[in-house]
Image (tube, grey):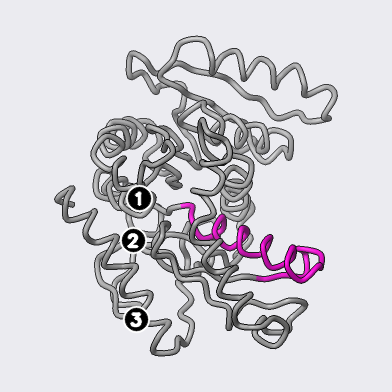
Amino acid sequence: MSRKKVTVVGGGFVGSTLAQRIVDFELADVVLTDILEGPPQGKALDMMQAAKITGTSAYIRGVSTANNDYSLTAGSDVVVITAGFPRKPGMSRDDLLKANYEVVKSVVEQIVKYSPDCIIIVVTNPLDAMTQAAWKVSGFPKQRVLGMAGVLDAARMSAFVAMEYGVSVENVQSFVLGGHGDEMVPIPRYTTIAGIPLPELLPKEKIDAIVERTRKGGAEIVNLLKMGSAYYAPSAAAMAMVEAILQDKKKILPCAAYLEGEYGIHGLFVGVLVKLGAKGAEEIIQLKLLPEEHAALQKSAASVRELVTVLGI
């Protein structure tokens, strides 16, 4: 049986770390692409030389797409798009909108040409709008285009809960809905420590602080790094989605998915709980929300719709 194939578009910190995780865990063979000539080939060669030590037989190849040649990505099962302009201190995700739309559009046009049956996972920011753009440009069914946001946001919340309560993060299960940005909707009521609802274990002021820190999680790291943005957790989140798809896990993960009436939202990619399997988004799980939670989700969706409207998609 031939191994699965994953293309990672964008050889920056997120893309190359994701490629390394996929190879190290032997999930698939990987093609790492970048518009630059040299860096993707060099990083791939470095990973291949590490394979003997890490004990993986997965193969990785680096490819420059400076001439827009994606032929070596042909036949990919999953394509993860990390390419785009990075966010810098003081820059909002919205500032990236039009520049990254052009990046995503050109990438997707080539991906569709060479891997017409693939599932696309978008990591490029602003995440929800870029996922909508990828879906629109690809012409794929909605199940085969997803955005990586909720897995990362929930992981950040879980980390903050574990740090605050002094417990293993393995005991924490967090849920975050909505767009990937300041209007995201962490749900403390559905967040648990060893199955115990968070409000039973922490006072409201501590929970509110965790919610706010989760919303600003990406910006906090950008401000600390001074140059660049987070990549360890984002790459791990993307890998969790890739693994669920390639291994047909039917795993419920928070992802940006296309809604057609769920939660009263129509025609928009927004973060919700999704059953991920070999067909992509196989089911959208709807939580029963309190009126204030529902209102917060509608507000988050409205922020996403503003970006989509600006792009005319």
* Residue at image coords 63%, 59%: 155
- Find numbered disc 3 in the image and state the secondary structure of the residue it sits on: helix
Tag shown at residue 295: 3
**In this picture, is 155 found above or below 117?**
below
- Judge the density around disc 2: few (<14), some (14-19), many (≥20) Cα neighbours within 10 Å: many
Tag shown at residue 269: 2
Q: Disc 1 versus disc 2: distance between alpha carbons?
A: 7 Å
Q: Disc 2 versus disc 3: distance between alpha carbons?
A: 17 Å
Q: Which residue is mark 1?
A: 131
Q: Disc 1 versus disc 3: distance between alpha carbons?
A: 23 Å
State if disc 2 and disc 1 touch (CB < 8 Å).
Answer: yes
- Judge the density around disc 1: few (<14), some (14-19), many (≥20) Cα neighbours within 10 Å: many
Earlier along the polypeptide chain: callout 1 or callout 3? 1
State if disc 3 and disc 1 touch (CB < 8 Å).
Answer: no
- Identity, as a three-letter code, of the amino acid under mark 2: Phe
In this rendering, would 24 be left or right of 60? right
- Identity, as a three-letter code, of the amino acid under mark 3: Ala
Earlier along the polypeptide chain: callout 2 or callout 3? 2
Q: Check residue 160 for magenta coloring.
A: yes
- Find numbered disc 1 in the image and state the secondary structure of the residue it sits on: helix
- Identity, as a three-letter code, of the amino acid under mark 1: Thr
Q: From the viewer's side, name the closer residue of 108 and 158.
A: 158
Q: Position of residue 106 (x, y in %)?
A: 28, 31
**In this picture, is 125 found above or below 181?**
above
